[in-house]
Image: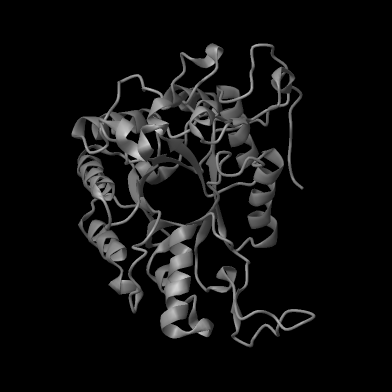
Amino acid sequence: MRGRMIENGVSPCKATTTLTMSHIFTWHFSDRTGMNGGTAGKCWTVPEGGIYDSNSPETAMKHVEDLNLLNIDVAILDWWGSYGTEWFAHQTAAINTYIGIMDDKWKGKYTVFLEQLDPDKIPSSLAEYAEFDQLDDWIKESNNWWYYKEKPVILLFNKVTNKLRDDAREVLGPPQQLQWIQDAVEKYYVIFVDSALDQRFGEPPPPGGEPPPNTGKQVRLVDIPGDFGAAWYAVPWIYSSYDEAKYRDRLRTIVEEIPFIDLWAYVHSGYDSRCLGKYGGPNLLWPRYGKDYFNRNAYHDGPSVEWLIHQRGLADEYSPEGLIYVHNEMGEHNSVTELTEDLSHLPFYNIRESSIRNCGFSTSPIRN
């Protein structure tokens, strides 16, 4: 396994031509206590500028100014689809607000991370999904949509990938169950997030082994022709065992075992969700290496500038196409929740800014 560690235990980061990206959550209301039954709201941290509404021009402008300051190349706008409750409609409206500001004031590019599709509908083709129709409208009308390898970029969460597979299997039959995912790869440059790249789908293998490779009865995501990428967003409130070794292994798998797929690397500053344990939520603190990990007595478990620099250094080892920072100031159990006393003066964007300034700004030409 490739890797390098300098004497004080921190993987060194570096200024890079790799794209620097920020994943922005668009689901915040001014009255956030009503979300998730009101319990999670008791644990969310108030950012420096106060509680905000994602569907606010002032909020979008503040974030765009912040991203411009840090030379962020690409903004990723989180979207849960075009159906459902007021919460979903609010996200769609928020993305329209961000796009309006970014088309006018943004020096970089933007794209959308689609998290799920309408669970109650099974369309007969990719074009019939309302969510992809909305994506096409945004792309068509955009001045600054991100293109990579001459295609518009979208990110698809595993819930979307799995539903496209299941719907195609229902409509077209098992041998063609990846057809609509393939249609998406042909039309867009897709970054698959938290998807099982080499898992076999279809009829079970016969007793004693796998079927011959050309039977058409089992298919894998990695077998789809074309250019696409992969990223892993899985974080400790979902997987408590998410640690440095697994982070390295996920990056290594792409680089060494399936190098024809582009690697996009999320970097996290650490998490402290112990507050949520009081309300039945995850009670997790990550990383948990203790004071001596960075050889400085002031360091504590949980989020820190040092850990974000360290994770970026780990990602740098595998030369990803891009580094993705998570920009979610108000935080659902993320890097700003219940910070330790020594870090209470560092809201998330200051942790990120400190790490980026330490490592060096992106020198990618995308903003020029």
For this view, does 174 lie left or right of residue 164?
A: right
Front in this rendered view, residue 336 or 228:
336
How many tags in the picture? 0
Front residue of 167/367: it is: 167
* Residue placed furthest toward the bottom: 215
**Left or right: 296 as drawn, with respect to 51:** right
**Residue at image coords 73%, 17%:** 295
Which residue corresponds to the image point at 28% horizontal and 46% vertical from the top-left? 87
Q: Nearer the viewer, residue 92 or 183?
A: 92
Residue 2 x %, y %: 74, 45
Position of residue 222 relative to residue 313, above or below, is below
Question: Which color mode does the image show?
Answer: one colour
Which quadrant of the view contains residue 47? top left
* Image-quadrant location for residue 171: bottom left
**Residue 302 x/y as whole percent:** 59, 25
Picture coordinates of residue 275, whole percent (x, y): 51, 25
Residue 244 image offset from top left, x and y in percent: 68, 38
Query: In the rendered image of this protein, does residue 26 appear above or below residue 149?
Result: above
- Asked if one can make out residue 83 in the rendered structure from this viewpoint, the answer is yes
Residue for point 24% across, 45% down: 90
The reply to whether residue 191 is visible in this rendering is: no
**Is residue 236 found left or right of 246 in the rendered image?**
left
Residue 165, compared with residue 315, is above or below; it is: below
Residue 97 vertical placement versus 172 (above, below):
above
